[in-house]
Each structure stands twice: as C-alpha cells, then as structure tokens.
Image: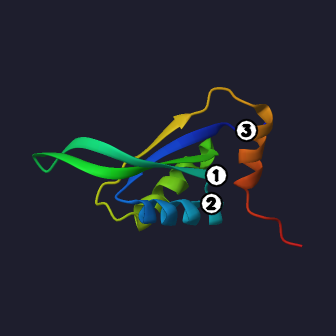
Amino acid sequence: MSENASLVYVTAPDGETALKLAKTMVERRLAACANILGPITSVYWWQDKLNTEGEVALVLKTTENLVGPLTRALRDIHPYECPCVVAVPIQAGNPDFLAWIAAETKPASTP
C-alpha cells in the first residue's frame, strides 16, 4: 500500500515564478510532479481592498506527510507575503500513479 497522496494548489504572480516554485519543489523531492495551469484571474480581499489580479495556478502532487515541509519551503521562497498554499487529500486514483508519487518524493538512495 502506498502512502496517502495529496494535491497542493498554489497561486503565483506569473509563469516564471510558478516555474521556479515547481522546479524547486520537484528538485527537492517535496513533490513528485508539478502542473502549471496557466493564467487565471483571482478576485480577493487584501488589506481591506478588493483586488482583481492575473495569476498563474500551480498544482503539486506529493504525499500527505510532506504537505507540511512543502508548505514551509514554498512560504520561504514565494514572493507573496501570504501565499495561497492549500492541500487536498487524494481519496482514490490509479494505484500505480499514487505509488509513483510516493516513490518520487523519497530522497534518492546513496550507493
């Protein structure tokens, strides 16, 4: 049985930032995979002001036990003061894909 997997949704100000976040999290093996979904429009309250901004959505696939470390790592390098980083547990899916997520988020073994 593989570890429980999670999807982590993140927003970024632009594609370049989203790509940097994605590559860093996958390189650190905090996520097995990242999907950059492209331009979105976000409408939100920030500092008592209603904002409408263009952003880029990012979805990371990881294991449940790495959601905390992944969130901390994203907060450390994200340009936003309060970045959107939310996790959703994966209830079910292709067992082979879920096992792959677990395998790719483990540090490579040393010889």
SS class, disc 2: helix
Q: Earlier in the sequence, mark 2 or mark 3?
A: 2
Query: Residue 19, position in %: x, y?
Result: 50, 62
Query: Residue 57, position in %: x, y?
Result: 43, 48
Q: Is residue 37 left or right of residue 3?
A: left
Q: Which residue is mark 1?
A: 33
Label 2 crowd (10 A; few <14 / some 14-19 / many >=20): some
Q: Is residue 46 above or below residue 96?
A: below
Q: Which is closer to the viewer, label 1 or label 3?
A: 1
Query: Residue 108, position in %: x, y?
Result: 78, 64
| Residue depicted at x 64% and y 44% | 63
Q: Quadrant of residue 42?
A: top left
* Residue 28 visible to the viewer: no
Q: Which residue is mark 2?
A: 26
| Residue depicted at x 64% and y 39% | 5
Residue type, mark 1 in image: Cys
Which residue is farthest front?
39
Residue type, mark 2 in image: Val
Q: Are marks 1 and 2 in contact (CB under 8 Å)?
A: yes
SS class, disc 3: helix
* Residue 15 visible to the viewer: yes
Which residue is farthest right?
111
Q: Which residue is mark 3?
A: 98
Q: Is residue 14 left or right of residue 62?
A: left
Label 3 crowd (10 A; few <14 / some 14-19 / many >=20): many
